[in-house]
Amino acid sequence: MNRKDLRGVGSKCRGLMTITALKLNLPRSIHTTSWQPTPRDTRPPSLWYDLAASCGYKLPPPELREIVDAPPLPALFISPQRDKILFLKRRSLPPLADLARPEAKLAGVRIDVNCNTRSRMSFYTGISIHQLMNDGTLGIEKTIHGLPDGAKINFVTWSNDGRHLAFVVRVDEDDGSSSKLRLWVADVVTGQTKPLFQSTDIYVNAVFDKYVLANCYRFIICLIDVKFPMNSDNEGNLLYQVADSMLLSFVWVGDSTLLVCTIPTCRGEPPKKPLVPPGPKIQSNEQKSTIQARTYQDLLKDEFDAHLFDYYATSQLMLASLDGKMEAFGKPAVYTSLDPSPDKKYVLVSSLHRPYSYTVPCGRFPKKVELWTATGKYVRQLCDLPLAENIPIAHGSVRQGMRSINWRADKPSILYWVETQDGGDAKVEVSPRDIVYMQPAEASEDEQLTILHQLDLRYGGISWCDESLALVSESWYKTRKTRTWVISPGSKDVSPRILFERSSEDVYSDPGSPMLRRTADGSYVIARIKKEEDDATYLILRGKGATPQGNIPFLDLLDINTGKKERIWESDKEKYYEKVVNLMSDQNEGDIFVHQLKILTSKESKTENAQYFIQSWPDKKTCQITNFPHPYPQLASLHKEMIRYERKDGVQLTATLYLPQGYDPSEDGPLPCLIWSYPGEFKSKDAAGQVRGSPNEFATIASTSPLLWLARRFAVLSGPTIPIIGEGNEEANDRYVEQLVASAEAAVKEVIQRGVAHPDKIAVGGHSYGAFMTANLLAHAPHLFSCGIARSGAYNRTLTPFGFQAEDRTLWEATNTYVEMSPFMAANKIKKPILIIHGEEDSNEGTLTMQSDRFYNALKGHGTLCRLVVLPYESHGYSSRESIMHVLWETDRWLQKHCVSNTSE
């Protein structure tokens, strides 16, 4: 059945549903996709759900719908000079028609064949600019204007001087498809926009852009492309980089010039697949190579796919200036990365080439990295890496040859990179394991490489400051060891020394990471801080501040020579959760004095959504710059509590308990309860028992969040820790089921003892590895739960034979573990009702839709009460409004019938 045929399925089902409803003399609300009976009808909701459950997209109860349909808050994007803030307007959930557009699945990339970009890409609907006044307040809104009606905006970037914006625009065509991308620029002062290219035949090729904006994010702060290899605050990284992280389709190479990946104007129509294949599909390993790979999806299948990949991925680089001048830059190729040097005189250009592979995605295809001048003159080739099908599956294994090729952020045009000394195999013992090299852009042929640093663990990144200071990180997954080194790049006589050495699992010992400042070139280096009363050099460490009472974010001044710390800022501990988003006092060159510090912070509480503030030293005066409304006022007074309890083996566990607004346990009694979680692997019991998160964080509710059921008067236990621990040489997964059940027993015992959960009305659910957890718990701990909800999971580990999650042993090395962990193998033990949901186009590694199909058939073959819902066009996560609303309807129906009513017995 093709896509056109599928589009009629929903309407046919709805038509059938209407006829059935009329014959039964049911209220019209049933066949108009709303579950609710008429006011005078007294039949229970579970009966209405049964009558409506045959086919067609459904809508959940209005109390769920209203939360999900709440308009999203804008994203914020701060100017390079820290004097302006963009508000990027976003739409709510996309329609299913957006996902149903034709796409090509090639080499691990899903391509919108009409737009020549990644498929399923979200977008902004408008841009406005606010001046950031000297007193910290926002000026009058200025709207970017002159765009076509219905413009869909992506990849917004500032020019280095902050005077212009560049972004791509597409519009809907008459046939419902989207147009190809055109590059536009905006004058920040006037707000006027125009296409960069005067010719209407030049389009942007954005196949390799990875746009990370997701529908679940209601508020995002972002800056220009910043790399934080040392940053331990992963959440902060997302906030910074969401607007143009991994932006590859165009880059600024000056204040008025851009280098753009364009669709070759002469490429013609896409190749057509021959009706008769030219021959059989052949893969061969006659060289007896050992090639192990995870269960990748969307790989090339044959030579025709390879031709299609070349067609859509090939770009012609173009240099274009704001005055309309343009010229070709090099020849057409499959360009994947453009990286200008800090001084904008050179560009690192990465591209892929044949031979391609049917075994691994395009990230492992042969890769060439070349150095060009910013004016389009070829300088030299840095490397040409061969096809990398044989990277071992062990954690810490890497590609051989030059990797992580970057520019030094503190120098105009000096390159550095890493090369492995263990052949890329983490199982090989060797010292050093990685070597960091350095070289000027235009090095002479006889110039020797400079060895910057040698590492015995795996290289993790470098934060640059100047010739006297850089911080290098390394880590090793198996032991969870992580180190940070202090090096002097310009002084061979100064020996490297360890600044921090700790376990990456030990969040209580995390010292934080250095805050970076923007340079005049637009790169980011470690901010050097001075005090007026001494000559010492300080860094600012920004950390999450994990404690047994929850996260208390902080800023510390670190004397880089003595190691002494001084806390200069800390979040409120009692009611609010605050965190530092960005340094705002780095407009001028030179050291920053403590009394001149200015930072952007966010502040939220259990019931108040995040607002943003400018805080200035020395008096730490704050000025609020946003006043966003509460996204779901109907849950403004919900109860949130971080709770601690103990597993029977002594491991400390934590969870966040949410209770509905106005709930009184003494009057209302125990509630139906939904437990939603995701297991994690640890090397130590102490680390597994540490508290992560804050009790004062705002309860953000994503479109398919379990917290939605607070509006349906459920107690929700969110994220109860399910640690799977393997201490010493023990493999964690060898005791997976035992530890999984023990963790679940402790969680259930805790909510029952607190009197908030009815022991016969507790449901369990999860997404992806959480779905795998759910199925295992119903198989091995059926006494704990009334039903389960499993979304986008993998249930048979023999179908992922070369590893999954943190498991890097193969099926043949750990056969018993693979089999015992697989709920598919225990399908005959599952007797409690289970709802299985999966996207029909799941692209996630290992979670093929086939996993849910086969698991459902196994359950059905043993008479289990089960239901399988496959969502057309959806991937691993669900994005269209129709699908999300239906998922909520299915989930609510399941909970009403098998948890609230608990009629499954």
Image (tube, helix red, strand yellow):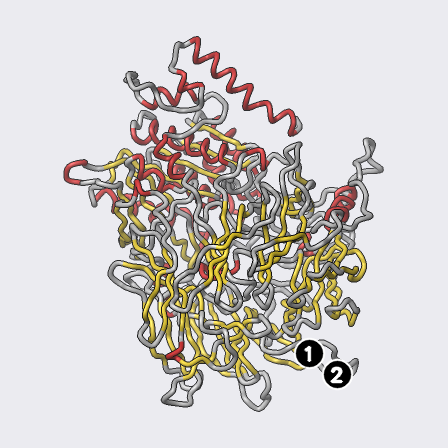
Left or right, residue 107 beside residue 523: right
Q: What element carries label 1?
A: strand
Task: Name the residue beneath numbered marker 2.
Answer: 447
Give the mark nearest the N terminus, 2 or 1. Answer: 1
Quadrant where the C terminus sits is top left
Residue found at the far right of this picture: 278
CB contact under 8 Å: marks 2 and 1 = yes
Kind of residue sitting beneath label 2: Glu
Q: Whole-percent x and y of residue 239?
A: 47, 58
The image shows residue 163, relative to residue 886, as above or below, that is: below
- The x and y percentages for residue 165 are 59, 59
- Residue 287 badge: none
User: In the rendered view of the protein, which quadrant contains the N terminus?
Assistant: top right
Alpha carbon separation for disc pair 2 and 1: 9 Å
Q: Nearer the viewer, residue 717 or 426?
A: 717
Residue 593: give x, y in percent of width and height. Answer: 41, 81
* Mark 1, residue position: 439
Dot 2: few (<14), some (14–19), or many (≥20) neighbours within 10 Å? few
**33 or 488: nearer the viewer:** 33
Identify which residue, 379 or 560, lies in the foreground: 379
**Rendered view: 135 above or below 305:** below
Task: Give the residue drawn at x 37%, y 41%.
Answer: 706
Asked if 130 appears above or below 313 in the picture, the reply is: below
Quarter assignment of residue 601: bottom left
Q: Answer with the quarter of the image where residue 675 lies.
A: top left
Total marks in image: 2
Q: Position of residue 449 (x, y in %)?
A: 70, 80
Q: State whether residue 361 is above or below residue 473.
A: above
Tag 1: Cα neighbours inside 10 Å, few (<14), some, or many (≥20)?
many
